[in-house]
Amino acid sequence: MFGTTFSRLLFVVSNTVLLGLLALAPWTVPKRDFDGAALLVTPFGMVSPRALQVPGPEHFLGSVTLGFWVFALLVVLAVVSFFHPNPRRRAQMLYILGGIGLAVFALEAVLFYQAVYSVNSAALAAGTEANRLPLKRYALSLGAYLGLFYSLALLLAARLQLPAGLAFLVRYRGVVVPLFSLLLASLFGMLVVALLTPAPGAKGLTLPLGNAITAKLDLVTYTFQLLFSPLVSLPGWFQSLLLATPLIFTGLGVAFGFRAGLFNIGAPGQLTLGAISCMLVGVYMPGPGWLVLPLSIVAAALGGALWGAIPGWLKARFGAHEVINTIMMNYIASSVFLFIISSNEYKFFGATLRLPFKAEGFEARSAEIPEGARLPFLLSTLAPQGHLSWAVPLAVVLALGVYAFFRRLDLGRRLLLAAAACLAGFVAGGFLPGPPVEISPALRSVRLNDSFFIAVVALFFYNFYLFRTAGGYELRALGFAPKAAEYAGVNIGRKTILAMAISGALVGLAATHYVAGGGIDEYRLKQSLPVSVGFDGIAVALMGQNTPTGVALSALLFGVLLTGGLQLNLQLGISRELVTVLQALIVLFIAAGGFLPRYFTDPLKAAEVETEAKASREASHTGKEAC
């Protein structure tokens, strides 16, 4: 009874707060200056600290006012519906209201962009240059987005009213916990921005209380629009993938250790050894580039595997904890790294030791990898010489087709045939003529390289090995219950070493992005190697819930935030450290289970919810048959 009363009270309070936000928040922004100052359209008028004007303001104000009153009515009806005694009728009403809300949001967006198009089209017809249009950087704002999210929340609330609704949510807890943690982190980030940053265009001005709140709400909305702005442009996507690619490797490496019940905190050291190994083979191994390049990639994996296997062996042989071992190995790796590239001469007991690894000059860096042994840029692979290549699309289609066609073969043979088909398709597609494409200078400047394809292969390897092979099953069993796995015949010592070696190999492959792919600025080993992405991999693995899809999406999210952080700093002067704060908050809330009930974090509690839901469905079905 308490739970029902409390949930109803919470629903009423949250809807009341939502009504206040809908009334004060800007719904659309028809015009915004580069420094963020904007004309804000609210349901009851327009707010602009700099008194910006737009032609035909009634076109923007009328649709926003109508949208507000429709959503206000939906909120009232939702509160009334929530108190209906019949759960099924309550769910039906919430479904209807949620659907209406989505339709209203879509209509609001259409009306807004039509109004913008009409104003700019009239200016173009009058002879205005394209770069001097009256409406620039226009966008929907917080009020419209609140209506969208509220409609989705109503649909989710409707599903929860039905039998087994809670079990449905718990079943997807691997998605619910990270998303809820991201939401909490975003709310705290909004609070930090609102408290520490003046509203755009309002610095030094005294605004009425309502206008000041509207300006602050626009500030937090615009902040997150800038953070996620890379998603609306192709150069933004490429730059985000550039930053996400090494995070995929390190996230997979840490997640692999988690799956085996091991906390691999030595990713920075494994990345360092992978980079050293990749450089040694890429620079000093003689031979043609087509041979040196794949061997340097293998060397990067082996270097990371070696640095991961050593703590694994220490744990298996002596019981030493892997966290302490991997932390110490990080220090050793950094010292080896500096020893190799910081100087060419060292003195030991009066004797001079000369090393060939440091390049000429004062900067701590190695010699450069020859051109033929470098990973090409992704743009050069997808569109060489300004023409779209069919190599990658044909390789993907043939690989998936062969894998799907030979279902009766065992997994190993299917993968081998799919790999052969992928290679054949890539080679054949390179000879097919492709249409010309126009590539912008902004896109050409992004240094995303083919290590991204290696990351995709690593994702497939992670998925197939852990979830489709006997060895992967044993590793997961070791992570869930070591004693039970040992009783079932799993060699814990050997599996511990193997798990740490594979974890290190996945992390070591991140070095291909920096050394063989020139991910920073040069194709060499440099002191500026960003080994901190090894620690970032912990956050990626946690948010991705140790699944390949989750790791890829969380790495992409962090890449988008890091890219958008640059725009945030340029346009609003907000430090890019806000992204670091968000990452830390996400990890904190995930570690706390998103402050959700235990059945979202405890598999045993989740199983109990599933069992209760199944019993409820069976009882309901039996009752219907009796009637």
Image (cartoon, rainbow, N blue to C red):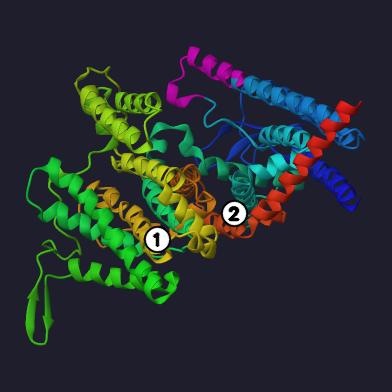
Residue 315 visible: yes
Give the mark, 1 or 2, whose residue is nearer the N terminus: 2
Q: Percent position (x, y) of residue 202? A: 62, 47
Foreground of the two, 394 or 361: 394
Above or below — where is 329 with respect to 579? below
Above or below — where is 423 with respect to 313? above
What secondary structure do most residues of the magenta stretch adopt? helix
Residues drawn in magenta: 114-133
Label 2: how many residues lie within 10 Å, few (<14), some (14-19) or many (20+)?
some
Judging from the image, what secondary structure is the residue with disc 2 in? loop
- The residue that mark 1 highlights is 495
Q: Percent position (x, y) of residue 32? A: 56, 35
Residue shown at 22% from the left, 18% from the top: 432
Judging from the image, what secondary structure is the residue with disc 1 in? helix
Label 1: how many residues lie within 10 Å, few (<14), some (14-19) or many (20+)?
many
Residue 372 visible: no
Q: Percent position (x, y) of residue 570? A: 45, 47
Kind of residue indicated by mark 2? Thr
Above or below — where is 210 with respect to 321? above
Q: How far is the residue under mark 1 from the one under mark 2?
A: 51 Å
Q: Report whether 389 appears left or right of 536.
A: left
Q: Percent position (x, y) of residue 221? A: 61, 42
The answer to if 545 sits in the magenta stretch is no
Q: Report whether 277 appears left or right of 221.
A: left
Q: Which mark is residue 511?
A: none
Kind of residue indicated by mark 1? Lys
Image quarter for residue 621? top right
- The residue that mark 2 highlights is 197
Foreground of the two, 126 or 568: 568
Foreground of the two, 112 or 374: 374
